[in-house]
Image: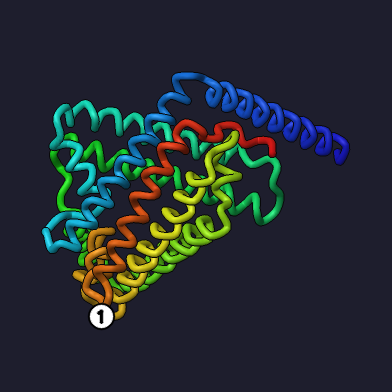
Amino acid sequence: MKQTIDEASKDIVEKADDVVAGAGETAERVQRHPVYQGLVTGGLIAYGGMHLLLAGLGVQVVRGVGADASESGSIRMIASAPFGFVLLLLIVLGMAALALWQVLLALFGYGYLTGARLLRRKLSSLGRAGLYAGLGLLATRVLWGVEQNSNASTQSTSAALLNQWYGPPLLVIAGIVISLVAVAMIRRGVVRSFAKHDLQGSVPRWAVWLGSVGWVMKGVTQLVLGFLFWVAAWQHDPTDTGSLDLALKTIAGQPFGRATLVTVAAGFAAFGGYCFIWAFNARHDVSKD
């Protein structure tokens, strides 16, 4: 009986290994396909363009112009441009490709890492996949004319949560998650791990510098955003929560806030420039060091 169970278990393991190996080979074929790589390149170019627009919106906040300085605001700006409908369609396709890219990396990539470092990279890729999918959904909503102001959307959700007993703890948890992501972004920029894990081939040193500054500035704004969620939970006030737009406007309202916000906007512009280099040097196959 024991021998039969052992043999059955061995067969199941072998079949599972075959399925995983087959899925990995399929993923490699997808990653090598020129259409897929072209969509990823286009998605990263669109991602960089969004950050350049965010930098411009951040400058408008400094000037006191009432702009929605968020990803949603930048996508609406693209929609209002000539051929905006076509551009939004390309963004939707590009973000879908980026999300698929990161899912494949989370499932089959980073074979040269082990232990905690491997887990951290895979979780990072899953997080990025969610981010890109969210941006694609935003573009889709703007495309269909159903996207509202980013702060209003977040605050209405927070208000609904705060009316429930479990709302404040959930907002605290959301603030913690956002803050952890922010710390990871800042760390990525400081230690420049993106140069190893995201890029292939040689790129100019100035491009790595742009990426470093950009990741740090993105992390700083996410830290502020996480803090706002904690404040909303503590004061039971949904108006304290919001999108990147509210985080930037909160920075602007602090002592030396305008100078700080100009620095953050410059960081977004730096990240946008880095994305253009990243687009043509993206590391698709990360199974080997």
Q: Measured along the vertical axis of the image, is residue 73 above or below residue 190?
A: above
Q: Nearer the viewer, residue 281 or 285?
A: 281
Image quadrant occupied by the N terminus:
top right
The structure residue drawn at horizontal position 15% and vertical position 62%, both measured from the top left corner, is 63
Q: Tell me if residue 263 can be seen.
A: yes
The structure residue drawn at horizontal position 38% and vertical position 43%, both measured from the top left corner, is 273
Which quadrant holds residue 252? bottom left
- The residue beneath circle 1 is 235
Q: What colour-coding does the image apply?
A: rainbow
Residue furthest top in the image: 34
The structure residue drawn at horizontal position 47% and vertical position 25%, both measured from the top left corner, is 37
Q: Secondary structure at mark 1?
A: helix
Which quadrant holds residue 16? top right
Is 57 on the left-hand or right-hand side of 277? left
Q: Position of residue 9 (x, y in %)?
A: 77, 37
Is 13 on the left-hand or right-hand side of 105? right
Q: Measured along the vertical axis of the image, is residue 148 above or below residue 233?
A: above
Total labels drawn:
1
Which quadrant holds residue 225? bottom left
The structure residue drawn at horizontal position 37% and vertical position 35%, both measured from the top left corner, is 45
Q: Tell me if residue 153 can be seen.
A: no
Q: Position of residue 60 (x, y in %)?
A: 17, 56
Image quadrant occupied by the C terminus:
top right
Q: Nearer the viewer, residue 233 or 286?
A: 286
- Label 1: few (<14), some (14–19) or many (≥20) C-alpha neighbours in 10 Å: few
Q: Position of residue 137 (x, y in %)?
A: 29, 40
Is 67 on the left-hand or right-hand side of 127? left
Residue furthest right in the image: 3
Q: Amino acid at mark 1?
A: Gln
